[in-house]
Image (spheres, grey):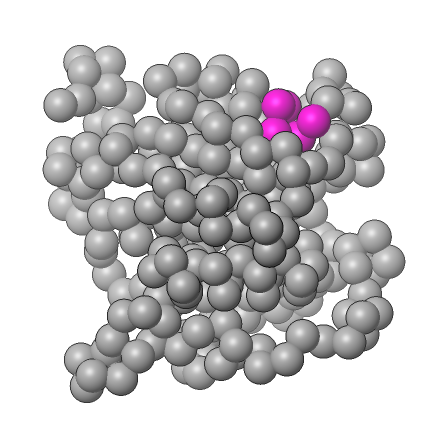
């Protein structure tokens, strides 16, 4: 049951017919793992915390640097040189001390990925490299964990939800990450954010939408991005959704 303070804190969710009291209780019981506490992970973590997700795991082995602050809004100048999982955890605790934060100060690898995702209901991928994305997508598919994965680069962003272990109404499986990207791009084929740059506010747009998709996996409403990818072009302010 929600406490009196929680009834007040989440009042705008509780009166929302798509969530209501039962949905808010599901959010409070939910465990979400966010991979990356950077440009995407920052808004994802902030909005999942604000939504009342009861347990938030954070995977990141990096420390906060000054160049991060242009887009990684969960960190501040006072957090420079701190581990990002520590800085993000402190910000979440200041927003809602009732949330359990589980820091994973490491990089995901073939050796630790299965154990890391095992205790979570939904995984959000905000990583910045294809090695981690493929590793995480394969692990989530094998463990039957919903994965909401997003990416940003320069002025463009993308978002999709993956449940390849589930079936459509016609009995066929929903597609997986390797249906969208059959092969990893060659090393250096796609410039990194440090090489090409990225619009900071676009990270907030994509990360906030990613949080919506995660919440939708916990307390279902509307139509998720299963078998569909949302592409955002900030140059021409275009939002397009394609099936795959």
Asked if 135 appears above or below 46 in the picture, the reply is below
Would residue 48 be visible to someone looking at this image? Answer: yes
Main SS of residues in magenta = helix
Asked if 44 appears above or below 220 in the picture, the reply is above
Determine whether, in the image, residue 181 is placed left or right of residue 163: right
Residue 158, how many percent across, how many down?
Answer: 56, 65
Locate the C terminus by quadrant.
Answer: bottom left
At x 27%, y 84%, the residue is 172
Number of labels in the image equals 0
Residue 3, how many percent across, how many down?
Answer: 18, 16
At x 27%, y 47%, the residue is 218
At x 56%, y 46%, the residue is 112
Residue 184, how many percent across, how many down?
Answer: 67, 75
Residue 202, how many percent across, how many down?
Answer: 62, 53
At x 40%, y 46%, the residue is 118
Asked if 44 appears above or below 167 in the picture, the reply is above
Query: Which residue occupies the extreme front position in the image?
Result: 111
Is 206 contained in the magenta span?
A: no
Locate the N terminus by quadrant.
Answer: top left
Region rendered in magenta: 83-87
């Amino acid at each position: 049951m929600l406490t009196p303070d929680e009834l007040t804190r989440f009042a705008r969710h509780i009166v929302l017919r798509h969530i209501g009291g039962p949905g808010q209780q599901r959010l409070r019981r939910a465990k979400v793992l966010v991979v990356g506490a950077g440009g995407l992970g920052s808004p994802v973590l902030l909005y999942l915390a604000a939504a009342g997700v009861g347990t938030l795991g954070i995977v990141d082995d990096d420390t906060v640097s000054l160049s991060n602050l242009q887009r990684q809004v969960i960190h501040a100048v006072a957090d420079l040189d701190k581990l990002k999982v520590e800085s993000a955890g402190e910000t979440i605790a200041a927003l809602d001390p009732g949330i359990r934060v589980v820091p994973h100060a490491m990089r995901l690898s073939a050796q630790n990925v299965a154990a890391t995702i095992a205790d979570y209901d939904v995984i959000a991928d905000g990583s910045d490299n294809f090695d981690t994305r493929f590793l995480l997508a394969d692990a989530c598919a094998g463990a039957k964990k919903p994965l909401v994965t997003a990416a940003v680069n320069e002025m463009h962003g993308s978002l999709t939800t993956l449940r390849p272990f589930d079936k459509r109404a016609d009995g066929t499986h929903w597609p997986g990450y390797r249906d969208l990207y059959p092969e990893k791009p060659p090393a250096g084929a796609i410039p990194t954010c440090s090489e090409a740059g990225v619009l900071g506010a676009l990270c907030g747009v994509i990360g906030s939408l990613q949080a919506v998709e995660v919440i939708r996996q916990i307390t279902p409403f509307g139509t998720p991005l299963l078998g569909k990818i949302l592409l955002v072009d900030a140059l021409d302010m275009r939002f397009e959704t394609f099936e795959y």
